[in-house]
Structures are given as structure tokens and as C-alpha cells.
Amino acid sequence: KQPLLEVRNLQKHFNLGNGKILKAVDNVSFAIQQGETFGLVGESGCGKSTTGRTIINLYDTTGGEVIFNGENVHKMKGKKQQEFRRNMQMVFQDPYASLNPRMTVGNIIAEGIDIHGLNSGKERKERVLQLLRDVGLNEEHASRFPHEFSGGQRQRIGIARALAIEPKFIIADEPISALDVSVQAQVVNLFKKLQKERGLTYLFIAHDLAMVKHISDRIGVMYLGKLVEVTTSEELYAKPLHPYTQSLLSAIPIPDPEIERTRERIILEGEIPSPLNPPSGCPFRTRCPHAMPECAAAMPEFKEVEPGHYVACHLY
Ligand code: SF4
Ligand code: MG
């Protein structure tokens, strides 16, 4: 089946001047099926947000391509481009910074409806009120301003805004990272509910694996601009292959104290290297407990080692 989104050998490099090139995204490939949630995980600065922003065409590509619904996102024009802008929407990390403080919640949510000239008058109002209900807020909220809401409520407003023009695909860039732990699960559950009701497809970006597990069908792990492992959510937790994924997983506390007590934590040595000056060969080799001489010599190929399970590591 043709995937809804295909990312092929995507590269996004930034020229910082003085001969410095930041390879924020380097040769990343993955595909997302219609109705699926793909989690993209890694430490801050690994290139996951840049990947999202390049996919939605906020950035041009340096190399490779992004195919949405069979069309090259960065080559679309006219009607196709307009359609794409409706079909792909973004939910941002910071619900405080991403909502205009001088606009009412109703007008914030209706922004896309107005830009795309979809509804006016009574229909527009009805649509806004329905969206408020759909995200667990109520109708009186339409005339209020963002500062009157909690972080979790603001993120619901951001989600309603993204949904207003009925997109097919949502990129959620760390949508729960800025929220209290107590409300994170509620927002994740809202994403799940909306997906079920509307058949949405998600790219869900996060910096830790704990919450992503509950929403993702498949997960990709990024390190220093490279995708190092991709597989199903279950497989990744049961049988992580890449040493970096193994260390990320070992950092998640397990609720069962018996397992927690006997479990081995993998503590990584050293800092994450500067993406401006990445190590030769495997980008993870300066912190990898299994590093071998060949790891410095060549970048391991990203290959399928079991059906649907991809990893870039010389151990396999
Ligand atoms: Fe570690 Fe080598 Fe595998 Fe990189 S290629 S993750 S350094 S074993
Ligand atoms: Mg980010």
C-alpha cells in the first residue's frame, strides 16, 4: 500500500557561515501509512523538529524528498500546494508562545478557516464551538483570551486550531513536553480520541520514550541528525537493537519495584557531541558501550535486520 507520507534520504543542512555547516537532518528515510502514528524520538538537538519543519515545508530541503499523497511537497504549486497546506497541520511544543495573546480563542481557532475562506458567519461560529467541544473545552471559552487558560487547556486550543480546516495529517512537535506530568496523559488521550474519530495520521515528536509508547504504532529514534532505528512500538520496547535506543529505554522507570530493583541502567558516558563537529563513522561511537574500531571508520548502513525492524549499527 502506498504510504500517505514518504521521507526519502532527507537532508537539511544549515550554512552558518565561516565554512560551518550544520547537518541538522542527514539522510533520513521513513514512511507513514494513512491512519498510523509514527513517533520520532531523540535528545534535543538531534534534528527531529527540523525533520518535522522540513516535511511541512517550513524549510526547503538540502537533499532528498518528501512525498505526501504521491506528490513532492517541495515542488508543489498552485492548487496542489493549497491543498497540501490544508491537509498537513502542526501542533507546537509551547502552548504559551504559539497562541497570539491579543486574539480571542474563537478567532485563534478560526484562523485557518478564515485564511482558506472556508466558512463565514453562522457556520464559522458553529464550527468553532464544535471544535471547542471536540477538544474538551466549552463554548464560553470562545470569547476568552489565551492567558486565562492553563498549559493543558492552551494545548487543547492549539489542537483545535490545527483541526479547524480538517487536515489529514498532523505533525505534533513535542506537544506534551511543556505540560505538567499530570496533564500529559490527558492530552495524549485527546490525540488518540481525535485520531479515531477523524482517521488522522500523526507524526508525533518527543524527546523521551515514556509517553510516545502509548500513542505510536511505530517509532523512529534519531541521534545527531541520523535515524538510527525504526520498528513497531512493541518491538522497540521488547527488543531494542541500537545501543542508543537501549540506553534511552533503560532510563525509563518501571512501575514494578521488583523489576526496577534488579534492572540494569545503561548510563551513557560523555556529552552528546556538537552536531557541527560530529564523530567520524557512527555518530554514537563516542558514547557507545559497544564501540569497535570499525565504528570510527564507517557509518553503519541503515538496514532491515528483521521484518520491519531497521537499525544502523555495525553489531548487526
Ligand atoms: Fe555502537 Fe558501533 Fe553500533 Fe555505533 S556502530 S552504535 S558505535 S556498536
Ligand atoms: Mg525541538
Image: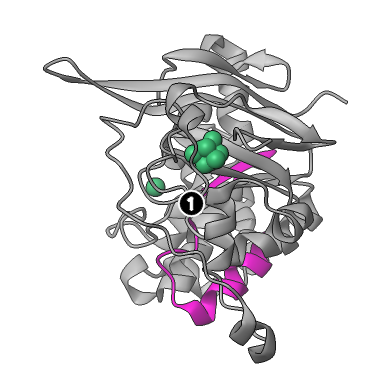
Q: Residue furthest front?
A: 293
Q: Position of residue 41 (x, y in %)?
A: 54, 49
- Quarter of the picture containing the C terminus is top right
Task: Give the image quarter of residue 190.
Answer: bottom right
Query: x, y percentage for residue 226?
Result: 49, 32
Location of residue 283 in the rendering, given as x and y in whole percent from the top left corner: 43, 34
Q: Nearer the viewer, residue 132 or 276?
A: 276
Q: Residue at x 42, y 28 (%)?
A: 296
Q: Position of residue 95 (x, y in %)?
A: 39, 61
Residue that appears at 61% across and 52% down = 122
Q: Residue at x 54, y 14 (%)?
A: 64
Image quarter (top left, top right, bottom left or bottom right) of the N terminus: top right
Q: Choose between 277 and 3: the one closer to the eye.
A: 277
* Cβ at disc 1 under 8 Å from ligand 1: yes
Residue 117 appears in the rendering: yes
Residue that label 1 marks: 289
Seen from the viewer's position, the closer of residues 272 and 2 is 272
How many numbered marks, from 0 up?
Answer: 1
Q: Check if residue 171 falls in the magenta segment.
A: yes
In the rendered view, does 254 fall on the left or right side of 182?
A: right
**Residue 138 in sight in this render:** no
Residue type for callout 1: Pro
Residue range in magenta is 164-191
In the rendered structure, does residue 169 fall within the stretch colored magenta?
yes
Query: Dot 1: what SS?
Result: loop
Q: Residue furthest bottom?
A: 257
Q: As drawn, is 33 to the left or to the right of 24?
A: right
Neighbour tally class for label 1: few under 14, some 14-19, many 20 plus, Cα within 10 Å: some
Tell me what residue is drawn at x 49 percent, y 22 percent.
298
> In the image shown, does 116 or 59 lie closer to the viewer?
59
Residue positioned most to the left: 18
